[in-house]
Image (cartoon, rainbow, N blue to C red):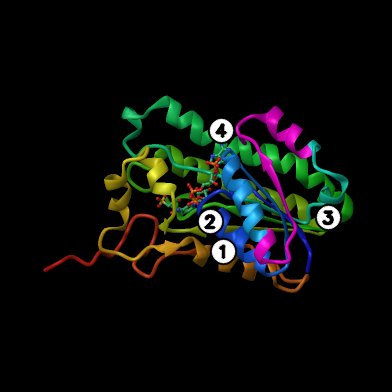
Amino acid sequence: MTKTTLITGATAGIGEATARLLAKNGYNLIVTGRRKARLDNLKKDLEKNTTAKVYTLNFDIRHRDKVEQALDSLPDEWKDIEVLINNAGLAAGLGPLHEGDLDDWEQMIDTNVKGLLYISRKILPGMVERRKGHVINISSTAGKEVYMNGNVYCATKFAVDALNKAMRLELVDHGVKVTSVNPGFTETEFSLVRFKGDREKAKMPYAGMEPLRAEDIAEVILFVLSRPDHVNINEIIVTPKAQANAFYIHRERER
Ligand code: NDP
Ligand code: 8X3
C-alpha cells in the first residue's frame, strides 16, 4: 500500500493524527498547512520512524494562486494523488449572528468552503483521468444540525456536506469514491483557535464530558480508506459517547 495521499491541515489535530496513522500503514503523504516548521518536523519524524515518504507543501489554502502554485510545484512522482483528505478548517468565534465579526466570517468561508474547492478543483481532474481516487471531506456534526451561536461555522459545514454529495454524484461515473467524515467534539487546537488563544474558554466545551481525540477520527479515516475497492462509506458521524447530536451534550457535574 503506497497510495499517495494529500492531507490539508496536517500541522495539528485531526490532520496530523491522520498523517501519523496513515504513515504507519504504508501511505505516502503530501502534508500541507501554513506552519512550515511543523510540517518539516512531521516529515522528519515520519521518515525516521516509518517507511512512508513525505512531501511538504506550505501554503495558505485561502489564496487560490498559492494553492495552484503549490500543487503545480509537485515533482512528477508526487503528482498522481490517489487520496485527498480535505481537512483544513476552523471555527472563529461563537456568538449570535447579529453580533458577528465579519472578519471571522470571511476566514471561515474562505478556508472551509473556498479553500476546499480550490484544492479539489486542482486534484480531481487527475483522479477522473486515471479513473482512480478517493476524496474524504471532513465536515462535522455542525454540518448536520445547527447549534446555538454556531451560525456561520455551521453554514460552512453544511456547504461541505452539500459539496460532498455533489462530488459523489458527479464522480461516481469516473470511478472516484467520496466520503464525508463528520466528527463531533474532538479535543484538538480547534477550540483554542475558535476562542483566539483563550485557554480557559477553549476548555469550556469539554467541561464534564470526555471528548474524542484526534486519533479516534484518524482511525475512522483509515477504516474508510482500507475498505475493498468495491465498497464506499458514503458518510459517517462520530461523536463522543456523551454527545447525542450537534447541540445536546451530557455533562457529569460534581455533586
Ligand atoms: P486544528 O485547529 O487542530 O487543525 C486545523 C488544521 O487546519 C491545522 O493543521 C491548520 O494548519 C489548518 N488550517 C487552518 N486554516 C488554514 C489555512 N488558511 N490554510 C491552510 N491550512 C489551514 O483543528 P481540527 O484538527 O479539530 O480540525 C480539522 C478539521 O476538522 C476542520 O475542518 C474542522 O472544522 C473539523 N472538525 C473539527 C472538530 C473538532 O471538534 N475539533 C469537529 C468536527 C469537525 P495551519 O494553522 O498550520 O495552517
Ligand atoms: C466542530 C465541532 O460542535 O464545536 O465541528 O462545531 S463543534
Please, what is the three-letter code of the amino acid marked with disc 4? Asp
The residue at which mark 4 appears reads as: 110
Residue lying furthest top: 102
Please, what is the three-letter code of the amino acid marked with disc 2? Ile
**Helix, strand, or loop for circle 2?**
helix
> Does ligand 1 reach within 8 Å of label 2's beta carbon?
yes
Please, what is the three-letter code of the amino acid marked with disc 3? His
Sequence-first disc among 3 and 2: 2
Q: Residues within 10 Å of mark 3 (few under 14, many from 20)?
A: some
The residue at which mark 3 appears reads as: 174
Q: The magenta stretch spans which residues?
A: 47-71
Residue 84, percent from left and from top: 70, 52
Q: In the figure, is residue 85 to the left or right of 101?
A: right
> Does ligand 1 reach within 8 Å of label 4's beta carbon?
yes
Q: In the figure, is residue 88 to the left or right of 144?
A: right
Q: Nearer the viewer, mark 1 or mark 3?
A: 1
Q: Can residue 233 be seen in this view?
A: no
Sequence-first disc among 4 and 3: 4
CB contact under 8 Å: marks 1 and 2:
yes
Q: How crowded is mark 1: few (under 14 residues within 10 Å), some or many (20 or more)?
A: many
Sequence-first disc among 4 and 1: 4
Of residue 148 and residue 83, the one placed in the foreground of this image is: 83
**Helix, strand, or loop for circle 3?**
helix
Q: Measuring 75% from the left and 32% from the top, which residue is drawn there?
A: 69
Instruction: Give the total number of marks visible in the rendering.
Output: 4
Residue 119, percent from left and from top: 69, 41
CB contact under 8 Å: marks 2 and 4:
no
Q: In the figure, is residue 84 to the left or right of 195?
A: right
The residue at which mark 1 appears reads as: 218
